[in-house]
Image (cartoon, rainbow, N blue to C red):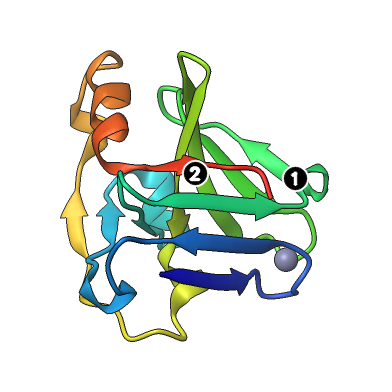
Amino acid sequence: MDYSTECSCGKNKALVQLPQAIEEYQARECDCDFCVSYGLAYISDVKGTLSFSPRQTMHQLNQGSGQATFWQCSNCKDIVAVTHRDNGEERGAVVKTLLSKYTLQSSVKVSPKQLTSEAKPERWAMVWSKVVLE
Ligand SMILES: [Zn+2]
């Protein structure tokens, strides 16, 4: 099922394709300082896809171990998505607040900061959606 959304100012659009209805997903709420400060939780499905654009108007932020890229609207400062590129394949997750117009399950807490730098991409490869270009 396809779900489209945009950041607060509307400059950046995201399209999320999920194999199940979005109401069945629990966002993952990361407990690192960066995500907590922005109140970020993420939705993805390893069998789903994510696209967002236009990337040229977004800031790319790195934090913590620097392995993940956070995509921020340069205008309204919303974080839209997080991605990671591994072996030429980009995977990512969309930020839950962008999908707040849907009725979502309560989030579950996750703590990727406890994973090693080797284990993080392995974890993301199991839970994040494939990023596709529009
Ligand atoms: Zn914006």
Q: Quadrant of the N terminus?
A: bottom left
Q: Secondary structure at mark 1?
A: helix
89 displayed left or right of 40? right
Classify 127 as above or below 123.
below
Residue 108 coordinates in the image, percent (x, y):
17, 61
Label 1, residues with CA under 10 Å away: few <14, some 14-19, many ≥20: some
Q: Tell me what residue is drawn at x 53 percent, y 17 percent.
A: 88
In front here: 69 or 43? Answer: 43
Q: Tell me what residue is drawn at x 24 percent, y 35 percent.
A: 126
Residue type beneath disc 2: Val
Residue 45 coordinates in the image, percent (x, y):
31, 51
Q: What is the count of numbered marks?
A: 2
Residue identifier under label 1? 55
65 displayed left or right of 73? left
Label 2, residues with CA under 10 Å away: few <14, some 14-19, many ≥20: many
Tell which circle, 1 or 2, labels the residue nearer the N-terminal end.
Answer: 1
Q: Tell me what residue is drawn at x 72 percent, y 43 percent.
A: 59
User: Spatial distance from mark 1 to mark 2, Cα to Cα?
Assistant: 12 Å
Residue identifier under label 2? 82
Instruction: Using the image, tell me which numbered label, if any, was put on residue 106.
Output: none
In front here: 113 or 83? Answer: 83
Q: Tell me what residue is drawn at x 27 percent, y 49 percent.
A: 31
Residue 28 coordinates in the image, percent (x, y):
26, 56
Residue type beneath disc 1: Arg
Q: Secondary structure at mark 2?
A: strand
Residue 24 coordinates in the image, percent (x, y):
21, 73
Asked if disc 1 is less than 8 Å from ligand 1, the answer is: no
Q: Quadrant of ligand 1?
A: bottom right
